[in-house]
Image: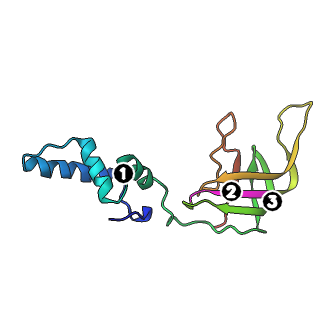
Amino acid sequence: MTTNPTELPTTGSLKQQARNLRQQLQDRNLTLSHSAALEMVARQYGYKDWNTLSAKADRPRPNVPQQTLRVGQTLQGSYLGQAFTAELRGLQVFADGARRRVTLHLEEPVDVVKFDSFSALRQRVTGIIGWDGRSIERTSDGVPQLVLELPD
């Protein structure tokens, strides 16, 4: 039994284990629904149910190489489609390691309004980025709100 998400097989492998269990029981004249087999596989891995196990198995793996970010570092990227150079002022890594909250102080403020007769300049930006340096939040045209060029 394991509860460490880094040691979990993929969801596809877990479903195959449930199919194998059903087949082995069927060979012994015992019937088991697929959902019951999934629940049994979940309990074998130490989880209370299939939904919990599959959610843990589908999480991004913390052993994915993570670019090193440190407070005080100078970064480049774009915010709302506007290029910037900024100093990283805050960094918070979430429990699964796949998302990071960054607070940036831009060298030059960017205008966050696309309206000719109105401006709203922003010099401090906070966002949550994934492994790829892109925010999940998107603009209305589908572009990530925040994109960082991460160092190797």
The disc label shown at residue 11, or none: 1
Residue 67 in the image: state x and y as whole percent: 62, 66
| Marks 2 and 1, how far apart at CA | 28 Å
Residue 127 in the image: state x and y as whole percent: 71, 51
Q: Is residue 40 above or below residue 68?
A: above
* In the foreground, 132 or 4: 4
Residue 100 in the image: state x and y as whole percent: 64, 58
Residue lying farthest right?
Answer: 117
Tell me which secondary structure the magenta stretch mostly adopts. strand
State which region is magenta. Answer: 98-104
Residue at 8 percent across and 49 percent down: it is 27
- Residue wearing tag 3: 86
Mark 2: few/some/many CA within 10 Å (<14, 14-19, 20+): some
- Give the label, 1 or 3, closer to the camera: 1
The amino acid on which the numbered mark 1 sits, given as a three-letter code, is Thr
| Marks 1 and 3, how far apart at CA | 39 Å
- Give the label, 3 or 2, closer to the camera: 2
Mark 3: few/some/many CA within 10 Å (<14, 14-19, 20+): many
* In the foreground, 39 or 6: 39
The amino acid on which the numbered mark 2 sits, given as a three-letter code, is Arg
The amino acid on which the numbered mark 3 sits, given as a three-letter code, is Ala
Q: Residue 34's image quarter?
A: top left
| Marks 3 and 2, how far apart at CA | 15 Å
Q: Please say whether residue 102 is one of the residues in the magenta stretch.
A: yes
* SS assignment at label 1: helix
